[in-house]
Amino acid sequence: MKSGIRWLLRITVLLIALAAGGTFIPRPLIAPVKASSSAATHRILLLSGPIHTDIAIPLDEETRAAFSFLDDPGFPLGHPNAEWLVVGWGGRAFYLETPTWADLKPLPVLRALTIDRSVLHVDLAGHITEPQSAVTAFDINDEQLARLRRFISDSFVREASEVKVISNAGYGKIDRFFEAKGYFNALFGCNTWTAAALRSAGLRTGLWNPLPQSLRLSAGVYN
């Protein structure tokens, strides 16, 4: 019994150390040299929940053109009240079957703790109020935003150049789920994908950010 408790304590201390190191060791370790002198005229948002993060990018003409493959009557990219394209990546079972905590079931949790196929959740948003605790904003330039768009676009699974929408899946009237590249697990999940997306735009994150709190803290410290 005492031996089991000691191992549990060791594992707990190790996880705490890894989480702390993942937060406070920056990635990349050395701040990248800015290759462009263009002004940071675009604002992107890190949207944080208790266990999940999304990225919101401004719905300007370039974004609408880059994601024109999403546009249809049920997902109106050109809607005059749509200001943001909101994208998140996650495990298929948990993401699709747990729209609220009241829908929590054992099997999706088990899949999330082991390994699962991944999906992208895409939504449109109007005005997002700032400042608020769940929203972290970053100002980036044209080139950085273009790289972020490419990273997100490249995360979609395509078949014959067409993205693969998941039928009859969504939380509301217009949001959609799509098949995504990669596999989800508890160590490298939705928040590590979000961190990689931010790094694609030239921002710095922690070395390993499995939780929204860790990602928000490290991104705030190093940018």
Image (tube, helix red, strand yellow):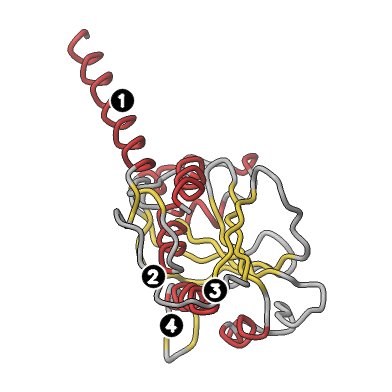
Cα–Cα span, label 3 and label 2 = 27 Å
How many residues crowd around disc 3 within 10 Å: few (fewer than 14), some, or many (20 or more)? some
Q: Give the residue type that dot 4 points to.
A: Arg
Q: Residue furthest left?
A: 3
* Percent of width and height locating residue 95: 53, 55
Q: Nearer the viewer, mark 4 or mark 3?
A: 3
Q: Which residue is mark 3?
A: 141
Q: Secondary structure at mark 2?
A: strand
Chain-order first, disc 3 or disc 1: 1
Mark 4 against mark 1, which lies toward the viewer?
1
Q: Are marks 2 and 1 in contact (CB under 8 Å)?
A: no
Q: CA distance from mark 2 to mark 1?
A: 31 Å
Q: Earlier in the sequence, mark 4 or mark 3?
A: 3
Q: CA distance from mark 3 to mark 1?
A: 41 Å
- From the top left corner, tell me how far across and down residue 105 is, in percent: 53, 41
Q: What label sits on residue 158 in the rendered view?
A: 4
Depth order, front residue of 210/183: 210
Q: Are marks 3 and 1 in contact (CB under 8 Å)?
A: no
Q: What residue is pinned by disc 2?
A: 181
Sequence-first disc among 3 and 2: 3
Please tell me in which quadrant of the rendered image residue 16 appears.
top left
Q: Amino acid at mark 3?
A: Asn
Give the residue pinned by disc 1.
12
In the image, taking residue 7 as reference, residue 156 lies left or right, namely right
- Amino acid type shown at disc 2: Lys
